[in-house]
Amino acid sequence: MLGSPLSCGPNRRSLCTPVPKPIDIRRAALTAALALFVLPWTAGGAWAQDDAAREVPALEVSAGAWAVTDLESGEYLAGNNASKEVPMASTTKIMAALVALEADLDEEVTVSEEAAAFAVPAYSNVGLAPGDVLSARELLMASMISSGDDAAYALAEHIGDGSVESFVGMMNEKAEEMGLRETSFENPVGFDARGHHTSAGDLAKMTRVAMQNPAFREMVSTQYATIATPYREIPLTNTNELLFAYSPATGVKTGTTPAAGESLVSSAASGDEAYAFVILDAGEDRFGASVRAFEHAFAAYDRTDLVVGGKKYAGSDVPYRRDERIELVAAESVEGLVDASPRVEREITVTKDLPPSARPGTRLGEVVVKVDGERVGESPLVARRGYEEASLWERVWYTVEGVFA
C-alpha cells in the first residue's frame, strides 16, 4: 500500500509506480487540438507569461454556469449564473474528499458487496470486488483520480461507520460550515437527485479550500497511479484531460451525468498566479474552455504588492516635540490581483493620541487597501523608530510655546 508522501520524485504527475499506458487516440487528438488552440496565446499567455496585466476582450464561455476565481484569495473574477443551483455530477467528490481528509487515511477498508455493486459499466468505476482490502487513502485516490464510484461508496461506508447516509450528512455539515448556500448533497458521488445541487461559485470555494491540503493537491494533479489489494494491482488514470495536454494545469475533478451535462472543475498555476475554473453543463468542449479561461486570466491579471512592507505611508508628530516627527511604515506587504487598469485605494488611519513613548515597531495606525471598491487586505502601520517620553521640562516648554505662538 502507498504511504506518504504520495510522489516518489519531483514529477508529481505519477504516484510512486507509473503505470505504462498504450497510446490513447482520443487523448492524443485532444492534446494536438489544445496545442493548436494555445499557439496564439504563447506570445503573452501562461506559457510565455508577461509580468504585467493586459487589456483583453471579455471572456465568453458556453455553459449552463461557470466561474473563474483567484485560487489564492478566492476572489470572483468572471462568470455567468455563478450562484444558480445546478446538478454537479462527480465534482461532488471534492466535498467527499474534504470530509475524508479529516479521517485516518491509513486505516484498512474491506470493500462491501454494496460498494462493489457500482463496479459495472453503468458507473464510473475502478473494478473493486467484494472483500478487496485497501487503505482509505487508496480509495480516495481511486475516487479523485479515476472517479471510481465504487471506491467513493466504499470510502463513504467506512468513514460513516457503515452508513453512507451518515457520510452524506457530514458532507452537508461541512457545506454549512463553509457557508455554501447553494449546495446540498444526497449521495457521495454526484448521482442526479432532486436535492443534490451546487453552484459554480460554491464549487470554486470548495476547490480553494481543498487545494490548500497537500494530499488533495497531490492526488488531483496525478496522471497515473497504482493501488493494490493483497492479490492484485489496480491501475488508475486521471479523467482530467488537462493534466495531459496543458502544462499549467494542477487539477481538479471531472463530472458527467444526464442532468449535469459535461462539467469540470479545474485549476492552473503559472508564476505567482493560480486560478480555479468551474464549468457546469458545458455547451462547448470543457477542456478547451478551461484552457481559454486560464490563458485569459493569466493575461488579464497580475499579482502585485499593493502595500510594500517597510515603506512609509504616513507620519505623525512626536508628543510634546513640535519639530520632531516619526515615520509610520507598513508592517507587512499586502498582495492583490489587479487588471490592466485597476482603481487602487489606500485608506490610512493614524492613532489620534499617540502614546507617551513608543519602541520601533509599535503599532500606531493601519492602511487598508481596496481594488475597484473591494477590500483586499490591510497592514498595521508601525513606528520606524522609537521615541522616549517627554520630560517635565519639555512638556512645560511645549505648553509655553503654544501660548506665545
Image (spheres, grey):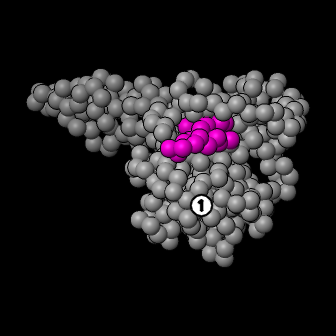
Q: Give the vertical position of 287 relative to 310 (above or below).
A: below
Q: Which residue lies at the image location 56% right of the left edge and 65% below the top edge?
A: 113
| Residue 263: % across, % down | 74, 55
Q: Is residue 255 visible?
A: yes
Kind of residue sitting beneath label 1: Ala
**Nearer to me, 122 or 397:** 122
Q: Give the vertical position of 365 relative to 159 (above or below).
A: above
Mark 1 is surrounded, within 10 Å at the Cα level, by few (under 14), some (14 to 19) or many (20 or more) other residues, namely many
**Nearer to me, 301 or 364:** 301
| Residue 322: % across, % down | 29, 28
Seen from this angle, which residue lies furthest bottom? Answer: 194
Q: Which residues are magenta?
A: 218-237
Q: Which residue lies at the image location 82% right of the left edge and 24% below the top edge?
A: 43
| Residue 164: % across, % down | 51, 68
Quadrant location of residue 319? top left
Q: Is residue 98 visible?
A: no
The question of residue 91 being in magenta is answered with no
Horizontally, residue 313 falls left or right of residue 323, namely right
Q: Give the vertical position of 302 relative to 287 (above or below).
A: above
Q: Quickly name the residue at label 1.
A: 116
Quadrant location of residue 348? top left
Q: Which residue lies at the image location 70% right of the left edge and 67% below the top edge?
A: 86
| Residue 115: % across, % down | 57, 63
Q: Give the vertical position of 183 relative to 387 (above or below).
A: below
**Nearer to me, 70 or 260:** 260
Asked which secondary structure carries label 1, the reply is helix
The question of residue 233 being in magenta is answered with yes
Seen from this angle, which residue lies furthest front? Answer: 231
Q: Which residue lies at the image location 54% right of the left edge and 44% below the top edge?
A: 231
